[in-house]
């Protein structure tokens, strides 16, 4: 079992699927995440090369707002649609 599968089993009771959905904007589900798990850890502000986005992290810590780019979202109908990012114009992934 992967770490992701174990996390899903523990916190959602099932696997959460993902589908391609490229976009950018404010992440709408941050407050819900914080209520369940606490503040977002620094890893959420790193790119695929492990570089920390110091500005993004500082903005989050000051305002609670996260603006990001993404390349996937939960599969529609997977029980978490209210947390899925809205489809927006395509943006380059980090």
Image (tube, rainbow, N blue to C red):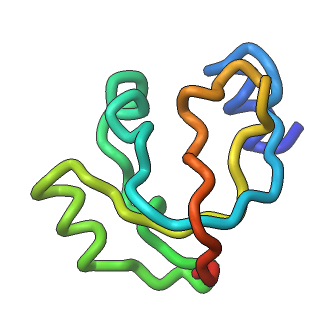
Which residue: 62% across, 83% down? 92
Name the foreground residue: 36 vs 75. 75
Which residue: 44% across, 37% down? 29
Measured as percent of width and height from the top left, residue 27 is found at: 43, 50
Give residue 56's quadrant in the image: bottom left
Measured as percent of width and height from the top left, residue 91 is found at: 59, 78
Residue lying furthest right: 1
Quadrant of the frame with the N terminus: top right
Residue 56, placed above or below residue 49: above
Measured as percent of width and height from the top left, residue 76 is found at: 77, 33
Measured as percent of width and height from the top left, residue 11 is found at: 62, 21
Q: Is residue 70 left or right of residue 37?
A: right
Q: Is residue 84 left or right of residue 45?
A: right
Which residue: 41% across, 23% down? 36
Quadrant of the frame with the C terminus: bottom right
Give residue 67's quadrant in the image: bottom left
Which residue: 53% across, 69% down? 69
Residue 45, placed above or below residue 29: below
Residue lying furthest left: 62
Residue 30, placed above or below residue 94: above
Name the foreground residue: 11 vs 88. 88
Give residue 22's quadrant in the image: bottom right
Q: Is residue 20 left or right of residue 50?
A: right
Please give the count of numbered marks on the rendered protein.
0
């Amino acid at each position: 079992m992967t770490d992701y599968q174990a996390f899903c089993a523990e916190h959602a009771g099932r696997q959460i699927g993902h589908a391609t959905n490229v976009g950018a904007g404010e992440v709408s589900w941050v407050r819900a995440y914080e209520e369940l798990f606490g503040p977002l850890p620094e890893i959420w502000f790193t790119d695929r090369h492990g570089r920390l986005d110091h500005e993004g992290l500082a903005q989050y810590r000051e305002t609670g707002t996260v603006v990001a780019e993404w390349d996937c979202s939960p599969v529609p109908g997977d029980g978490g649609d209210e947390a899925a990012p809205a489809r927006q114009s395509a943006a380059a992934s980090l």
